[in-house]
Amino acid sequence: MVLLFCLTIILAVIFGLGFPQTGNHVVYIPYMIGVMLFFNFLDVKIQFRRSYPWVLLITLFLSAVAIPVFAYYILSVGFTAPYRTGLLLVACAPTGITTLILGRYIKGSNYNLVLSNFLFTTFGSMFYIPILLKFVLNETVKLETSPYTLLGQMALLVILPYILSQTMVH
């Protein structure tokens, strides 16, 4: 199964590089993510009692602050500002659904922690990315949409597939 997953990723990258005109269908990406999350959540049983708040805070700090800042300042030697800024944005962006899928296949992984980290980085990104950019780049980022609209869209993208999958299972 892991081999099939790796092969799928490689083929997707090759397909994306070979057929760049498929970028015209970018409007369908949220729907595809919702479908993938739906299937991923089918056998999930969230246990909030088994949370690890310190581990969650440490991983959130590492993924949201330490790694992006470290990458930005490492690249400050030899790279121009646009490349450093681009890597900073990529490094502080939420991990996405790949962590949920990989967390299922890694033996001994704590899926509740993976899911909690995914939710915290996804919903927290709209707060910590502007703060991080202000701190590192000394530039203010203005959101073009309201934070409530962004939270609503993220909730629809993440929570709706979970609710649908759990109602289908039970």
Image: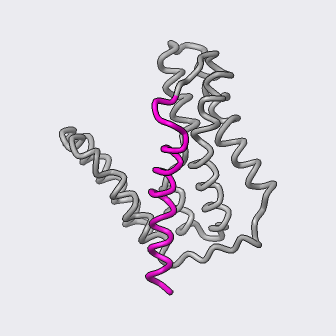
Q: In this view, does 28 lie to the left or right of 45?
A: left
Q: Quadrant of residue 157?
A: bottom left
| Residue 55 sits inside the magenta stretch | no
Is-magenta flag for residue 160?
yes
Of residues 162 and 116, the one drawn nearer to the viewer in this rendering: 162
Residue 100 image position (x, y, % from top left): 53, 61
Answer above or below: position of 90 versus 22.
above
Q: Which residue is drawn at 24% across and 48% down?
A: 15
For residue 97, side relative to residue 5 (left or right): right
Residue name at image x 68 percent, y 22 percent: 135
> On the rendered image, what quadrant is the N terminus found in?
bottom left
The residue nearer to you, when weighing 48 against 107, is 48
Percent position (x, y) of residue 113? Answer: 67, 62
Left or right of residue 74, residue 33 in this image: left
Q: How is the image coloured?
A: one colour
Q: What stretch is highlighted in magenta?
A: 143-170
Residue 153 place in picture, x, y as percent: 46, 50
In terms of image quadrants, where is residue 17? top left
- The residue lying at 53 percent from left, 25 percent from top is 142
Query: Where does residue 161 sit, x and y in percent of width and height?
Result: 45, 67
